[in-house]
Amino acid sequence: MNDQLGFQPNTLQTVISIKERPPRLAAISTVLAFSWRALLKIKHVPEQLFDVTASPVIFLLMFTYLFGGALAGSTGEYLQFVLPGILVMTVSLITIYTGLGINQDIKKGVFDRFRSLPIWRPAVIVGALLADAARYTMASMVMILLGVVLGYRPEAGLPGVLLAVGLLLIFCSCLSWIWIALGLVMRTPESLMGVTMMILFPLTFASNVFVSPQTMPGWLEAFVNVNPITHLVTAVRGLMSGQADAGETILVLAVSLGLLAVFGPLAIKAYRRKQ
């Protein structure tokens, strides 16, 4: 066939070899490219923003007006207590989507295309984390702005709110490494969703998000007191109310570092095995 068309045996190889290859992208450029890819998914499928826009609104309205009068005597007083907790709960639940996105890429075969590219390999994961940090920030802004409209007043002002959101982003970005590691080893998104919910639901609901642990049975109070979500809620609540607890903040940062130290290498190891 090549002879009939007049091609020499090595024509194609010769044409390819004389074309100058594009330069290899720097790691930061690759990370930004994958981060932009994740954000473009939102542009083309805006329903993905439901979890960072509608869910915070539903959670805050439902828990404030459903339980506020019974638990605190007034919805206004309960809002001051519960908003930081629901903020932590909402953003913590959103973290699972980092692992789900990677698991879906593997299932669809996109992951195989990425590994064939001459890029910095961890950029696939780091880019997804960077895009999800934007989602965490968006959910936090929606929650806090709605809270202010409903009557929530952070006594620490804007600096306290920014510090609280910053601490929350650090913890949730480190927590995401658990779901990334699971996303790389679980076979389907459905099984990954089941496992993450089984872990996250007890952590978020069996905590001090809605009520003080002192009102709970002894066995449950003991669990709540060692629950990392409880310490995160306490730290965020303190930063936003102007009564920051340095010990709780340092403990949250230490737990975040521990999550990153344990699950970061596990995720990278699972990622390399995929290659």
Image (cartoon, rainbow, N blue to C red):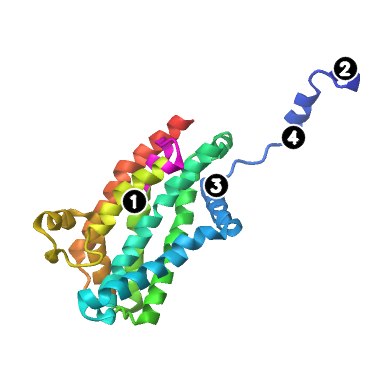
Q: Which residue in the structure is indicated by mark 4?
A: 19
Q: Which residues are magenta?
A: 177-190
User: Which numbered dot is residue 95?
Assistant: none
Let me know if residue 148 appears in the view: yes
> Is 220 on the left-hand or right-hand side of 115?
left
Look at the image and say whether residue 266 sits in the magenta stretch. Answer: no
User: Which numbered dot is residue 30?
Assistant: 3
Q: Residues within 10 Å of mark 2 (few under 14, many from 20)?
A: few
Q: Dividing the picture into quarters, in which one does residue 13 lie? A: top right
Q: Amino acid at mark 2?
A: Asp
Mark 3 and mark 2 in contact? Answer it, CB < 8 Å: no
Nearer the observer, disc 1 or disc 4? 1
C-alpha separation, residue under disc 3 versus residue under disc 2: 42 Å
> Is 211 on the left-hand or right-hand side of 185?
left
> Is 141 on the left-hand or right-hand side of 76?
right
C-alpha separation, residue under disc 1 versus residue under disc 3: 23 Å
**Residue name at image x 57 percent, y 39 percent:** 110
Residue 38: x and y, percent?
54, 52
